[in-house]
Structures are given as structure tokens and as C-alpha cells.
Image (spheres, rainbow, N blue to C red):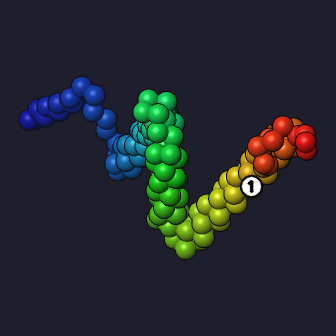
Amino acid sequence: MASTRVRIEAGSELAGDGKEIQEKSNAVSSEKAAMIGVFSHVAIAQAKKMVQFSVSNIGNFSGDYVMQRNVQQAMSIVGDIVSIGVGAAAGGVVGAVGAMTGVLINNMLESIGIAQNIKKENYQSNFIKERGGDVYNDGSRGTYD
């Protein structure tokens, strides 16, 4: 009788039909995908924070607050375009419509905030004008001698 030698490498698994090994490899890859997803989400959030911090301090560093506002508006437009693109890539037409709805709501809320600020600034300006009296209107001190 001839002897047969079987060699099993360390770390290898045996399965009768190979399905068990395939299931285990799928489970490991889904766990890795979840970890990569979490890591990429955290990395993207940190990158956004860094960009927002640097953009929000342009006026403080350079003294040019108009440039800061322009850069912030450009960043907002780019963010809107990217979110619509990601929505379209992830969910097709429905995803794009959903992303556009989100962008529309965000811009409407921002417009309402700007209108409220303008109204508040106009109120403060009118109050200062009324308090100053004729000095602001015709340069006099309020007496008609």
C-alpha cells in the first residue's frame, strides 16, 4: 500500500465545496468596506472643516472681507454642484431631484436670513438718523435762527 501525504499550510481552511470560504471572504470584505466608508466620511468631514476654517479667516488675515465673501459664495456654488452630481450618481434622476430640492431649500433659507439682516440694518440706520436729527439731514444743529 502506497502512503499518501497531505500538507496543510498554516492559516488555510478546508471546505468541501468552497462555499464556506467564499462566505467568510465576503463577510470580511463587507466589514472592510464599512470601515473604509466610516474612515472616508470622517476624512471628508475633517477636510471640509479645514477648508471652511481657512475660508472664514481670509478677511481676518488679509483685511479683505469682500474677497472672503466672494470665496465663500464660490465655495457654496461648488458644493451645490457637487451635491447634485453625487445625488445623480448615487440615485439617478431621483437622486438628482432630491439633491436639487436640498440645494433649493438651503438657498431659500439663506436668502431669508440675508433679507432679515438687511431689514435689521435698515432699522438700526433709521434709528441713528432719527436720533441725530437735522445734523444728518442739513448739517444744522436743529435751531432755525
Residue lying at the far bottom in this picture: please name it.
93
Which quadrant of the structure image shows residue 101? bottom right
Tell me what residue is drawn at x 31 percent, y 38 percent.
Answer: 14
Can residue 55 be seen in the rendering of this structure? no
- Examine the rendered structure and indicate whether residue 72 appears above or below residue 104: above
Amino acid type assigned to the residue bearing label 1 in the image: Ala
Of the 4 image quadrants, the one containing the N terminus is top left
Residue lying at the far top in this picture: please name it.
10
Can residue 36 be seen in the rendering of this structure? yes
Which residue matches tag 1?
A: 115
Which quadrant of the structure image shows residue 145? top right
- Examine the rendered structure and indicate whether residue 11 appears above or below residue 133: above
Question: Is 12 or 47 nearer to us in this picture?
Answer: 47
- Examine the rendered structure and indicate whether residue 108 appears above or below residue 96: above
Q: Position of residue 85 (x, y in %)?
A: 47, 63
Question: Is 139 or 56 nearer to us in this picture?
Answer: 139
Q: Secondary structure at mark 1?
A: helix
Question: Is 50 or 10 nearer to us in this picture?
Answer: 50
From the viewer's perspective, tell me whether residue 88 is left or right of residue 128: left
Residue lying at the far left in this picture: please name it.
2
From the viewer's perspective, tell me whether residue 66 is left or right of residue 21: right
Q: Position of residue 19 (x, y in %)?
A: 39, 50
From the viewer's perspective, tell me whether residue 85 is left or right of residue 116: left
